[in-house]
Amino acid sequence: MALTSILVVADASVSAQWYKDVLGAELHREYGTSAVFSFNGSWLLLVEGGPPTPDKPDIEYVPPTPTRASHSFTIRVADCEAAHAVLKGRGAVFLTPPYDWGAEIRCFFPDPDGHLWEISQLVD
């Protein structure tokens, strides 16, 4: 089995560029208004929003709003400050610098559509 997360985006080509250049995900294939990425052993499928379909008759796919999140992704890193510097250098826009909670150092950044990503370092 393999787990694929589907992310609804406003513009698949803009988001695909971000996932490739900023996050460093590997593009597997593109088709229509979708892009499939491999990232850290998981699959990410970017799809443009759309109306209900016969197999999901009452569900409309829409991108998230900029200030409300229903989920997020966490990337566990060995050094949050170093990962922050690399991602910021690639164009990630962080909500705050890394914040030290004592047992964890973490910070968050959105993709172009507002899907929230976190880098997190456990502190011994």
Image (tube, rainbow, N blue to C red):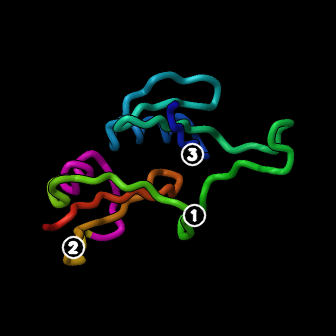
Secondary structure found at label 3: strand
* Callout 2 crowding tier (Cα within 10 Å): few <14, some 14–19, many ≥20: few
* Callout 3 crowding tier (Cα within 10 Å): few <14, some 14–19, many ≥20: many
* Along the viewing direction, whichever of 94 and 28 lies nearer the viewer: 28
Q: How far, Cα to Cα, is label 2 from label 1?
A: 24 Å
Q: Position of residue 96 (x, y in %)?
A: 30, 70
Amino acid under label 3? Answer: Leu
Residue at which label 1 appears: 70
Residue at which label 2 appears: 103
* Region in magenta: 83-96
Looking at the rendered image, the disc whose residue lies closer to the viewer, 3 or 2, is 2
Q: Position of residue 52 (x, y in %)?
A: 82, 44
The first of marks 3 and 2 along the sequence is 3
* Along the viewing direction, whichever of 86 and 11 lies nearer the viewer: 86
Q: Is residue 33 above or below residue 48?
A: above
Q: How far, Cα to Cα, is label 3 from label 2?
A: 30 Å
Quadrant of the image for the C terminus?
A: bottom left
Amino acid under label 1? Answer: Ser
Q: How far, Cα to Cα, is label 1 from label 3?
A: 12 Å
In the drawing, what numbered circle is on residue 7? Answer: 3
The first of marks 2 and 1 along the sequence is 1
Amino acid under label 2? Answer: Ala
Q: Is residue 76 above or below residue 122?
A: above
* Along the viewing direction, whichever of 8 and 70 lies nearer the viewer: 70
Secondary structure found at label 1: loop
- Residue displayed at 19% across by 77% down: 102
